């Protein structure tokens, strides 16, 4: 049995969408207070996503996604060869390059700074995030999905991160993929359960 702890619209939403894709039973627990003692007992890092697999806490969203897709034989992560390498490459790019770059903006919002310093840092963070979105757009000008011809979990994580409201411009190729991913029943169901509005594309 799986239990997913999530915060609405956070990176945990990608795991939520993947669980919906698999059509398996799971419980989704909204965890607003990440410093709540009961939650910290499960995840001392005080972060979502957290997945309980038969009661065993597993951290790191990308690890959960790979485990779930392998365990339940999903085409969202090819089993072998270069197709698997490319799917992992882009899943990890979303998780280890795009996500941390975007998260710097949330870090900045928590800092006490004078306005000039904030504006300068913000400009630099947005420029870094923009260059990553430009990279995704250039890739998607060449291939239908991030990993190639087939949709993979990387496209789902990309779609989740795109909705974090950073002041970046998303290219037309990125928008094409976002529209396709949010139309999937799994994505619509996660938006509905988490009560999140998708604003990155109409
Ligand atoms: N590397 C971790 C990052 C988890 C993470 O930073 N989660 C964010 C939400 S997207 C969070 O819980 N932030 C709250 C905090 O760090 O206090 C993963 O991919 O699972």
Image: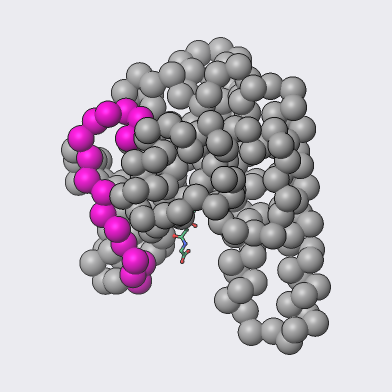
Tally of marks:
0
- Judge by depth and name the residue closer to the eye, 139 or 51: 139
Q: Position of residue 148 (x, y in %)?
A: 63, 20
What residue lies at 59% left-to-right and 45% top-to-bottom? 201
Question: From this viewpoint, is residue 155 visible?
Answer: no
- Judge by depth and name the residue closer to the eye, 25 or 40: 25
What residue lies at 66% left-to-right and 37% top-to-bottom? 174
On-image quarter of the C terminus: top right
Q: Is residue 101 above or below residue 35?
A: above
On-image quarter of the N terminus: top left
Q: State yes or no: residue 31 in magenta.
A: yes
What residue lies at 50% left-to-right and 50% top-to-bottom? 198
Q: How is the image coloured?
A: one colour
Q: Which region of the structure is painted magenta? A: 20-35
Give the farthest residue toward the bottom. 114
Give the farthest residue toward the front. 202
What residue lies at 37% left-to-right and 33% top-to-bottom? 185
43 on left or right of 181: left
Q: Position of residue 100 (x, y in %)?
A: 61, 54
The quadrant where residue 172 appears: top right
Q: State yes or no: residue 165 in magenta.
A: no
The quadrant where residue 29 appears: bottom left
Q: Is residue 151 above or below residue 116?
A: above
Q: Position of residue 165 (x, y in %)?
A: 60, 59
């Amino acid at each position: 049995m799986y239990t997913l702890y999530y915060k609405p619209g956070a990176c945990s939403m990608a795991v939520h969408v993947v669980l919906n894709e698999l059509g398996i039973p799971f419980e989704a627990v909204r965890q607003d207070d990440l410093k709540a003692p009961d939650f910290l007992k499960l995840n001392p890092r005080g972060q979502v996503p957290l997945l309980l697999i038969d009661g065993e806490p597993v951290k790191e969203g990308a690890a959960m996604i790979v485990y779930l897709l392998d365990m339940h034989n999903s085409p969202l992560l090819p089993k072998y060869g270069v197709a698997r390498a490319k799917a992992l490459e882009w899943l990890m790019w979303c998780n280890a390059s795009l996500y941390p770059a975007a998260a710097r903006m949330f870090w900045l919002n928590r800092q006490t700074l004078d306005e000039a310093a904030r504006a300068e840092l913000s400009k630099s963070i947005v420029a870094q995030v923009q260059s990553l979105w430009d990279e995704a757009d250039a890739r998607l000008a060449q291939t239908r999905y991030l990993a190639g011809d087939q949709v993979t979990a990387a496209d789902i994580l990309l779609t989740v991160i795109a909705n974090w409201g950073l002041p970046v411009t998303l290219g037309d190729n990125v928008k094409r993929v976002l529209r396709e991913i949010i139309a999937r029943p799994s994505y619509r169901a996660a938006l509905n359960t988490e009560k999140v509005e998708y604003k990155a594309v109409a």
